[in-house]
Image: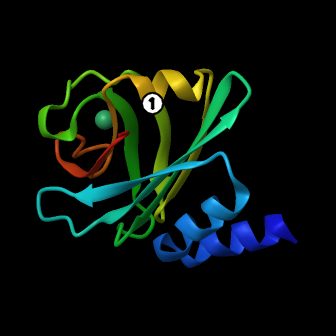
C-alpha cells in the first residue's frame, strides 16, 4: 500500500512527491528551479540505498515525449561546471529515476547540483537546476 501511494504520488506530479518522500523517511528533497524561461520546475529526491543513492527527478511543464538529458554537476546552479560528474537517466514526460553507485553523503557533502537540459539536440540550453543543499 505504501508503495502504491508513493507511485501514485509520483504520477500525480511534483506537488505530491515531497509528502510521499517525507512519509517514507531517509529521503532528501531539493527543489528544481526553472532556467532560461522554461517554466519547468520540480524536485529532486535522493534516497540512500546502502552505498548507493537513488536519484529521482519529477519535473512539471516538461515537453511531452521529449527526452531531456540530466546530470549531477559540480555546482552551484549559479556557477555550474559544464562537465557532468554523474549521468542520470534522461527526463521523459517529467520523470527520471537513476541509481548511482555513490553514497548519499558524497552527494550531500559536495557542492553538487542536478540539472536538466532542454533536449539531446539542444543540450546547451539548461531548463532546470537544483542545488543539493
Ligand atoms: Cu547536465
- The image quarter containing residue 9 is bottom right
Residue found 71% across the figure and 67% down from its top: 6
The C terminus: image quadrant: top left
Residue 19 picture location, percent across and down:
59, 69
- For image coordinates 46% across by 45% down, the residue present is 90
Residue 117 percent location from the top left of the image: 28, 46
- If the picture is divided into quarters, which one holds ligand 1? top left
Which residue is rendered at x = 34% and y = 72% of the image? Answer: 61
Q: Is residue 97 above or below residue 16?
A: above
Residue lying furthest right: 1
For the N terminus, the image quarter is bottom right
Q: Nearer the viewer, residue 45 or 73?
A: 45
User: Which secondary structure lies at badge 1?
Assistant: helix
Q: Confirm or reject: label 1 Cβ below 8 Å from ligand 1.
A: no
Q: How many labels were placed on the picture?
A: 1
Residue denoted by label 1: 108
Decide: is 101 above or below 58.
Answer: above
Few, some or many C-alpha atoms within 10 Å of disc 1 (few <14, some 14-19, many ≥20)? some
Q: Is residue 27 above or below residue 63?
A: above
The residue sitting at 56% across, 67% down in the picture is 17
Q: Is residue 96 above or below residue 61?
A: above
Tell me where residue 83 appears, x and y as whole percent: 26, 21
Name the one closer to the observer, 30 or 93.
30
Give the quadrant of residue 75: top left
From the top left corner, tell me how far across and down residue 45 is, in percent: 53, 50
Amino acid at each position: 500500500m505504501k508503495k502504491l501511494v508513493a507511485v501514485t504520488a509520483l504520477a500525480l506530479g511534483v506537488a505530491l512527491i515531497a509528502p510521499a518522500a517525507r512519509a517514507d523517511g531517509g529521503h532528501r528533497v531539493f527543489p528544481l528551479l526553472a532556467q532560461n524561461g522554461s517554466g519547468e520546475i520540480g524536485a529532486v529526491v535522493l534516497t540512500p540505498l546502502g552505498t548507493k543513492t537513488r536519484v529521482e527527478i519529477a519535473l512539471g511543464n516538461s515537453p511531452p515525449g521529449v527526452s531531456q538529458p540530466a546530470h549531477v554537476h559540480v555546482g552551484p546552479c549559479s556557477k555550474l561546471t559544464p562537465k557532468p560528474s554523474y549521468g542520470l537517466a534522461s527526463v521523459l514526460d517529467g520523470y527520471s529515476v537513476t541509481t548511482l553507485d555513490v553514497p548519499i553523503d558524497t552527494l550531500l557533502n559536495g557542492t553538487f547540483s542536478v540539472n536538466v537540459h532542454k533536449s539531446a539536440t539542444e543540450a546547451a540550453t539548461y531548463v532546470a537546476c537544483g542545488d543539493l543543499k
